[in-house]
Amino acid sequence: MTDLKLVPGNLDNLSEFERRLIKSLRGNGHLFPLSDEEIQHFEDCHDKEIRRAISKVPSADDILKRGRIEKNWTIIPSVDEDISKNMAQAAREGKTPTDAIKQKMLDDRNKSKNK
């Protein structure tokens, strides 16, 4: 492309090839469509995929009949020990922890793992 800072929809300063390429990519859903014609072209090209995706989504009535949606996932953040130590040290204004504090932290960590 001759200009990477394209204003969406402004294809005036582009070559014929670039204009046709952008229109094709938008029409096939690889770039965000800007006009009603581009949206309609995308829907016409991908009608089967759209219907298949819609058929898998439960209706609003089915969702409401269940009463609530169950949460079947959890997010378990990974803990990097080096980062954790650096953050703890930063919380103490950069001072190195004493042996008593290190022992207390170790005891607290062991207690939380045993729960």
Image (cartoon, helix red, strand yellow):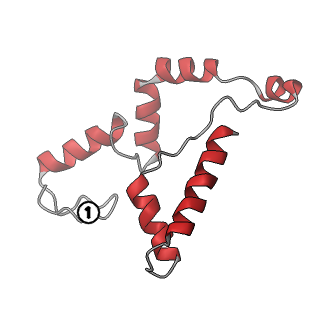
Q: Which quadrant of the figure contains the C terminus?
A: top right
Q: Is residue 13 above or below residue 19?
A: below
**Residue at 37 percent of width and 36 percent of height:** 29
Residue 55: percent from left, percent from top: 63, 18
**Circle 1 crowding by C-alpha within 10 Å: few under 14, some 14–19, many from 20:** few
- Dot 1 falls on a residue whose secondary structure is loop
Residue at numbered disc 1: 6
16 and 87: which is toward the camera: 87
Residue 34: percent from left, percent from top: 42, 51
User: Position of 3 compared to 102: left or right?
Assistant: left
User: Position of 7 compared to 40: left or right?
Assistant: left
Q: Which quadrant of the figure contains the N terminus?
A: bottom left
Q: Is residue 74 above or below residue 34?
A: above
**Residue at 19 percent of width and 61 percent of height:** 4
Q: Is residue 13 above or below residue 78?
A: below
**Residue at 52 percent of width and 75 percent of height:** 91
Count every numbered label the image shows and give the total.
1
Residue 79: percent from left, percent from top: 47, 49
User: Position of 43 compared to 27: left or right?
Assistant: right
Residue 3: percent from left, percent from top: 16, 63
Badge 1 amino acid:
Leu
Specify the quadrant of the image occupied by residue 46: top left
**Residue at 46 percent of width and 75 percent of height:** 90
User: Position of 33 compared to 14: left or right?
Assistant: right
3 and 66: which is toward the camera: 66
Specify the quadrant of the image occupied by residue 114: top right
94 and 23: which is toward the camera: 94
